[in-house]
Amino acid sequence: MLSFLKNQKSAVRLRIEGDVTTKLRLKYDPYYHSVTAVDGIHVTAEGRQMVMMSSNEYLGLSQHPKVQEAAREAILKWGTSSCGSRLANGTRSIHCELEEELAQFLGKEACHVIVAGYLGCQGSLAGIAQRGDALIVDKSIHSSLWDGAIISGADIERFSHDDMDSLAELLAKLEMKQPKIIAVDGIYSMEGHMASIPRIVELAKEYSAFTIVDDAHGFGVLGKQGRGIVDHFNATKDVDLIVGSLSKSLASTGGFMAGSKALIEYMRSNCRQIIFSAAVAPSQAAASLAALKVMQTEPQHQERLWENTRYYKKILDDLGLDYWNSPTPAVPIVFGELERAYYVWKSLWEQGFFTVMSVSPGVPVGKDLIRTAISALHTKEQLDRFGEALKNAMKKIGMKPKNG
Ligand SMILES: Cc1ncc(COP(=O)(O)O)c(C=O)c1O
């Protein structure tokens, strides 16, 4: 009996020690680099100052004086954590204030803030969808929605990435009486693509489907003052639940879900990710609240973000690089194969640019890429220098830049 148990344990050990993904990660080593200092869009890593080209800090507010001061004051007022679930002992008035402000900003009746954007997305599907429902998702949804879909036990139906004919065909095939939920990303994090919200809500109306949009990357970026993709397409009334992250434009950590009062109250009693996890740290809630106020009073950050994005795309066009037609500040540069993406990443690193390599299965096979993201903090001079660095990297893998 004892030796049988030993064998079981060694099977687990073998699985851990033989894991191919870990081996690949350790061979190609672009991950988990430790940053020792941050200064605007500069980070120091391995003793060198580098330009950050892959942060989701679209508006550049994590070091904004008002945001930093709000977080500092909140630590002094509330301590570093409320040490408990919102449902139990963890709710602080700063959480409630943030929720009220977010709901109003997004044009929804109510909002709930949760400890991670990932859990907000996962919990929204796991909490709403049930066995017997059809949960209809784009093939490229973020893992957080995907994991929620699996937990929910609903029938998962996938349509081709942002292909509205594929979505329409799928809906037409389903039984009329089956409850339907459509879930998409607002901006797809790897592709940078925007979801076709107008057609999605049209189809949702036709088939009486409930709609969920994960706008982690659209919030702060699109719409009036950064209200997100749903506002951008004037679809606030038509999308039932907007979920998002505090960790990107809101320069904090955590997530949110916003919808009708009845829906948010339902989530507060049924979403296990809310009930069984601690509250967002009060200082993080305070930072988000301050960032939200900055978004509404300082339009220059969103304007600068888009100016930089247009400038950067022109550089990529001149080099003839494939950025998967991303129309947003989330800009993948596709190199196709792991080794090519890796050598580009390495060359950029050596030239002082911090980027992120994303490879299959995180992206479709043949689409291995370097993910870049533009921030309001970038300067044109930095973007020009990055263009030069890309040119050098392309030459290293035998790619000829289009213009020289
Ligand atoms: C599309 C999308 N949804 C959700 C999340 C999760 O957000 P968070 O980092 O706040 O957990 C991410 C994270 O990058 C994301 O890209």
Image: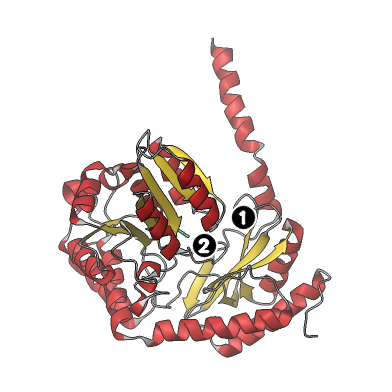
In the image, 344 versus 198, the foreground residue is: 198
Q: Quadrant of residue 73?
A: bottom left
230 sits left or right of 340 in the view: left
Q: For mark 1, what is the residue?
A: 363
Three-letter code for the amino acid on which mark 1 is drawn: Val
Q: Residues within 10 Å of mark 1 (few under 14, many from 20)?
A: some
Whether residue 377 is visible = no
Q: From the viewer's perspective, is 57 left or right of 88?
A: right
The quarter of the picture showing ligand 1 = bottom left
Q: Give the percent coordinates (x, y) of residue 170.
A: 50, 46
Q: Where, quadrant-wise, is the C terminus in this rendering?
A: bottom right
Question: Dot 2 surroundings within 10 Å: few (below 14), some, or many (20 or more)?
Answer: many
Q: Is mark 2 within 8 Å of ligand 1?
A: yes
Residue pointed to by mark 2: 189
Element carrying mark 1:
loop
x, y percent for residue 273: 32, 45
Residue at x-position 73% and y-position 77%: 320
Q: Position of residue 211 (x, y in %)?
A: 36, 54
Asked if residue 22 shows in the view, the reply is yes
**The quadrant where residue 324 appears:** bottom right
